[in-house]
Each structure stands twice: as structure tokens, then as C-alpha cells.
Amino acid sequence: MRTFLLLSIVSLSLLVLPSAYGQQEPLSVTPRAFSMQQAQDYAFENNYDLKNSAYDIQIARKMVRQNTAIGLPQVNGSVDYNDFIDRPTSLLPGEFFGKPGTEIPVQFGTKYNATLKATITQLIYSGQYLVGLQTAKAYLETVKQKNLKDKIDVRDLVADAYLRVLVIEQSILILDSTYKVVSKLVDEARASYNSGLIEDIDVDQADLNRSNLEAQLADVQSSRNIAYASLKFLLGLKDNQEITLTDNLEYFLAQVDRDALVNQPFDFNRNIDYLMLKKSDYLVLMQYKLAKTAYHPTLAGFIGISENAQRNSWNFFKSYEPWYRTTNWGLSLSIPIWSSGSRKFSVDQARLNVEKTKVTDEKLRVGLELQVETAKKDFSNAYFVYKNKKKGFETALKIYQKTTTKYQQGISSSTDLNQRYSQFLQANSDYMMSMYTVLSSKIRLSKLLEKF
């Protein structure tokens, strides 16, 4: 019998299970024990996505340094070498040679020429540089905020996966205990049949119940393997590394305070998604400022030193042959004058993007209010259902146990026992699912309400 609980847990597990489920390696010898907090802390250091998120912060820091370096002195060198197979020819007026009215071809220069040059440049003023540096720093803060959001997401995914494992483990305990009872009933029914007290159909029905429960138990145990694999994947562990969980469902259920969560006020400035949006808005504003700097002039200074050698024989490394030095310095001022509207349209686009952020801000505010209201209702409903299903499970268990006793005493019929058995299994399934749902909805609501 496949219950709704099993289908839900398996499908949720597959969401975080890697698609490539390769060959299994030998199991590790010593299992690692994790409380939920320990599992979350371990994931912060070893989760695959969080590792990349940490690299993003390092990349952003390097980007800030790169942008800073643009405004610092730049030193460049060059070496030029020319070997004239045919030297350049110039035409001189014939008057210089006593041949007026003619032009005399003359070759100037030497066959071999070499130039060594070094240039130092320093940016003195650039609006694009100043705003670009501020933008790079703002981007670094955005990446840090994104890393925090990634940690929160991983924290909640680990918590959800941890709870799924606990629910399955609890379900296995109940089903395994029930299986022992049903197996005992089968043996008793067979003994009663051999004594002529019941018909063979009662034995077959009891045996069918055991077979169905055995199949269900095997299915849940298979789901447990998937749930553990999902949790280990989130933690950054290999599938062959064994783990055990030290917390239990009662511990988490005892921490559920419905009234405190439902009555807790919502503050946009404490919500991680809203904080991320404000960081993004600031970046858009900086892009607008950066676009406007296209109208600013750029001033840079430079110092150049070069040495030139001219030879008719290849003896550049002879110390007695001269090299001629040239040294110069200067300023370079670039003034934007006319771009046929290109700069204006660029600024207009950036300004419109700033206007869009205002709409996006309002949209997120309204959306978050709706999310919080919905999450509170979902949590309240889940809590009510959990309390109801818990009571229903306890009642169904009591009825099933009493009916079993009556059946063993010959007071109750096998039909009545089968009905109570089916009722108990359904109550168990509903109860397990209600525990997972209330704890999962608590995680979602807490994420919206908590302060960062």
C-alpha cells in the first residue's frame, strides 16, 4: 500500500537528489552523528553551492582591487626594432644640388634602428573611474548579501531534509511494530484454522495484510535511503559516508509555538529577499551615475623615457656605440563634445532602470505581505491538522489494539479487525504527514519573519 506520505516524501527527496546517481562505493566504517544544528553548520562549510558562493565573494574582492588599480600609476615598456631592407626615400628640390626644376631622390637614416621606451601614466581625474570604483564596492556588498541568502536557503533545505528523514524513520518504527503484530495474528489465525475454529478465508486475509504491510515497509525503507542520500548531498558528503541523526521529532514539535509565530509582526527591512532587492536597487542607481559620467572630461598625466639607436652595422650591444635618450612629460585632457545623442540615450536608459526599481520595490512589498499572510494561514492550518491527526492516530491505535485483543479472544470478527487495521494504517500515514507539514510550514514562515 502506497500512502500519500510516502509519495510526498519521495518526490520531495528527488528535488534535491543529484541526477547522476552513480555506482555505490563501499560504506564508511564509522557513521557521523549530526544534530540539525550540526548538520547546518557542516553544510555551511561543505555544501557545493555555498563553496561557489564563497568564491564569488573572493572574485568580487579581486574586482574591487582591479578597479582601484586603474587609478594608480601604470608603467608600460616597449622595444621596437627595424631592419630596413630598402631604406625610405625622400625627394628633395633639385635647387639644393644645382639642378633647379628637378627632384632628387635621397635615402635618409640607417639600416638598423632600435628604440627602448618606458611610459608612466597617472589618472588625475575621471568621473567614470570614481563612480566605477563605488559600483565595484557596492557589488561586493551585494555578493556578500547573496552569500548570506544562500546560507539561509541551504540552512532551510538541510532542516527540511533532516525532518523528512526523521519522519520516515518514525514511520518505519511504527510499521515495523505493526508488522510484528500482524505476523503474530497470521500465526494465530493459522493455528485457529487448523483447529477448525475459523475458515481459510480468514487466514488468507490475515496473510494478505501481512504481505501488503511487508511491501509497504520495504517501500518506506527504500524511501529512507533516498532521503538520507538527499541530506548527505546537501551536506556535501559522499553517498558512501554513513550518518546518524541525533535529534528527534518530539524535540522539534515541542519547539512549535503557534501563537508566537502567527502574531509576530512582519518587517520588510528584516526580510532577506527585500534586503537583497535594496542592494540590487543601489547597483542600478550606481549604473545611472556611471552613465552620467560620460559627460565628464578625463585628465591624465604621463612621463616618457626612450632611447634610440641607429646603426649601419648590427652592433647594438657595443658599449662604445651611442644610444640617444629622449625624455618628455605631459598632460592628456579628453573632453566629450558631441556624440550624436549616444550619451544622452545611455543616461535615459539608466534613469528608466532606476524608475523600474521603484515598481519592483512596490511589487515585492505587496508580494511579501501576501506571502506572510499565506504562510501564517498555512502554518495555522497545518498546526490544527497536526493536532487533529495526532489525536486521530492515538484513537485509531487504541481501537486497533482493542479490536486485536477481542479478535484473539474470539469476540470480534476478522472483517472488523481488517477494517480497524486499514483505519489504523491510514491514521498513521496522515499523522506522519501532518508532522512533516507543520514543521515544514514553520520553517517557511520563520524565514519570512526572522531578522537578518
Image (cartoon, grey):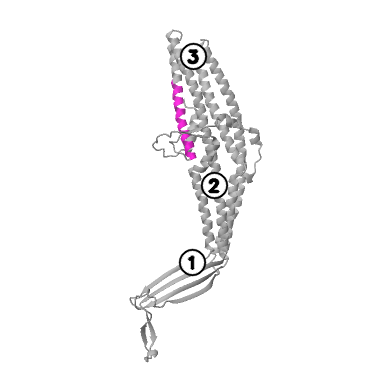
Kind of residue at badge 2: Asn
Q: Earlier in the sequence, mark 2 or mark 1?
A: 1
Q: Is 270 displayed left or right of 325 in the figure?
A: right
Q: Which mark, residue 414?
A: 3
* Label 2 to label 1: alpha-carbon separation: 37 Å
Label 1: few (<14), some (14–19) or many (≥20) C-alpha neighbours in 10 Å? few
- As drawn, the residue found furthest toward the bottom would be 98
Q: Quadrant of residue 351?
A: bottom right
User: In the image, residue 379 lies at what x, y percent?
Assistant: 60, 34
Residues shaded magenta: 211-235
Kind of residue at badge 3: Ser
* Whether residue 82 is situated above or below residue 152 in the rendered picture: below
* Whether residue 371 is situated above or below residue 301 in the rendered picture: above
User: In the image, residue 195 lies at what x, y percent?
Assistant: 44, 7
Which quadrant: the C terminus?
Answer: top right
User: In the image, residue 12 lies at what x, y percent?
Assistant: 49, 35
* Label 3 to label 2: alpha-carbon separation: 60 Å
User: Would residue 435 be seen by someone viewing this image from the given angle?
Assistant: yes
* Whether residue 415 is situated above or below residue 351 in the rendered picture: above
Q: Which residue is depicted at the point 65% across and 35% down?
A: 260
User: In the image, residue 13 lies at what x, y percent?
Assistant: 48, 35
Q: Earlier in the sequence, mark 3 or mark 1?
A: 1
Mark 3 vs mark 2: give the one in front: 2
Label 2: few (<14), some (14–19) or many (≥20) C-alpha neighbours in 10 Å? many
- As drawn, the residue found furthest toward the left would be 85
User: Would residue 347 be seen by someone viewing this image from the given angle?
Assistant: no
Q: Per the image, is 245 magenta? A: no
Q: Which residue is depicted at the point 62% across and 48% down?
A: 362
Q: Is 333 displayed left or right of 193 in the figure?
A: right
What residue does disc 1 label? 75
Q: Which mark, residue 147?
A: 2
* Label 3 to label 1: alpha-carbon separation: 95 Å
